[in-house]
Image (cartoon, rainbow, N blue to C red):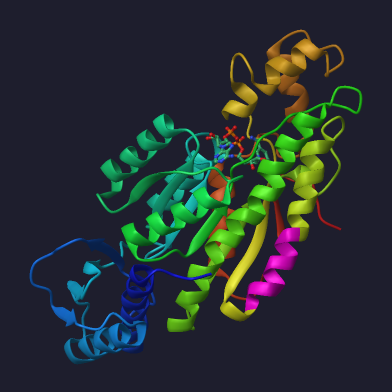
Amino acid sequence: MEHSDRTLAAVAIRMSCARELAALGERLAPPSVRVVESGGDAEINCDDRSESIVTAAVTEFVRKHRCLPRSVRVAGLGTFLVTPPREGRLAGCVAIVTGSAQGFGLGIATEMAAAGGTIVVADLNTELGEAVAAQLRETHGELAAIFCLADVTDSRSLHACVETTVKAFGGLDILVANAGVLKAGGLEEMDEDAFDLVTRVNYKGYFLCAQAVAPVMKLQNRICADWFMDIVQINSKSGLEGSRRNFAYAGGKFGGIGLTQSFALELVPFNIKVNSVCPGNFFEGPLWSDPERGLFVQYLKAGKVPGAKTLEDVRDHYLSLVPMHRGCSPRDVTIAILYLHEQQYETGQALPVTGGQVMLN
Ligand SMILES: NC(=O)c1ccc[n+]([C@@H]2O[C@H](COP(=O)([O-])OP(=O)(O)OC[C@H]3O[C@@H](n4cnc5c(N)ncnc54)[C@H](O)[C@@H]3O)[C@@H](O)[C@H]2O)c1
């Protein structure tokens, strides 16, 4: 895929800054690079917009001054403002978290921002998504998050989201492919439309997200070969073992692990790790606890749990299936994401986070 000149310049500035500061002994953590149409006088001025010239100019500046430039003007493209990374385990990392307007995604985005990450809240739900991004900015500063309207079933919208991300922050280091839907039902109830929707969002959507983010990640690798990047799919325990009367969901999640292993093999030469996290049930999240459409209500009405008379009975039944006797939280999932991000000798894995409910063979 062709990158725009602006993307090439932003990534060249960000990654050459990171590479050169690391060569001087600093932690490898890229700065934030934001493009503005005209930014007045800049510390570096490039009359030539080619990637190699921009990289050379930034490299020379950092080696000479032993610090980041505050701004780089590239003829015809605008001024790129450079801001040092925030502190934390995710210092310097820009992460797109799909489906982060609510549920697991919201919690993951919040935890990742608290760990120093810069978050792109990518969701179909503009109202909730905007509010999440605004809250993250209020807590962690203006450069901590943006909202981006994105539909994981539409490759054009995903490419636009990646472009917006690079324009706002200069690059992209982590994709958390979290957006997902669930339509349960056995063979007698499941209609084709419901099956297609679940497959399109949970399975094909993951492919489209990986396809949209890989080009920028590869470009970053070309400029700074030591930088590791991550694609993390939020899978499910239903991706590791069958789920009764829930085959559309389980099938797509099993397939997701096949995608993870295959993407991992394809992207390993570029230091892009690809892994899945397989959480247990998040009982406090809207999927289970929504008072009208949540699974507790649905399962009570459908008589799915024999003998259950109240929502509490349904909940107790599901809790009894978990050896650790509690549901999975966004924090549990984020700890797994941070582990996958920090380790540099594993890819293509499916990591259960299920309180012991699912154990790997
Ligand atoms: N909730 C659980 O118990 C549980 C357990 C295991 C795994 N998971 C997985 O975690 C992920 C998140 O689940 P959740 O329970 O938080 O869901 P949720 O329904 O609470 O939130 C899903 C979010 O994704 C967004 N979304 C839906 N379709 C989208 C699309 N096409 N493009 C962009 N955004 C879209 C929604 O607007 C929403 O904000 C899913 O992949 C799910 O399979 C959930």
* Front residue of this view, candidates 42 and 91: 42
Q: Which of the pair 343/195 is nearer the observer?
A: 195
Q: Is residue 48 visible?
A: yes
> Looking at the image, which residue sits at the far top?
309
Left or right of 126: which side holds 355? right
Residue at image location 48% in from the left, 69% down from the top: 216
Residue 317 in percent (x, y) is at 78, 23
- Please state if 37 lies on the left or on the right of 236 as rendered: left
Identity of the residue drawn at 64% across and 65% down: 274
Q: Is residue 18 magenta?
A: no
Q: 296 or 331: nearer the eye?
A: 296
Furthest-right residue in this view = 188
In the image, 39: left or right of 124?
left
Residue drawn at x 38%, y 62% as measured from the top left: 166
Question: Start and end of the magenta stretch?
Answer: 259-268
Depicted 316 relative to depicted 324: above or below = above
Residue 135 % position (x, y): 33, 38
Location of residue 191 (image quadrant)? top right
- Quarter of the rendering occupied by the C terminus: bottom right
Percent coordinates x, y for residue 280 in the rendering: 70, 41
Does 263 appear in magenta?
A: yes
SS assignment for the magenta stretch, majority: helix
| Closest to the observer, 114 or 45 | 45
Which residue shows up at 50% across the image and 48% down it? 157
Estimate the x, y position of residue 54 in percent, counting from the top left.
Answer: 29, 83
Up/down of 250 relative to 246, above or below: below
Report ligand 1 position as a quadrant.
top right
Say if residue 234 shows up in the picture. no
- Image-based side of 52 in relation to 214, left or right: left
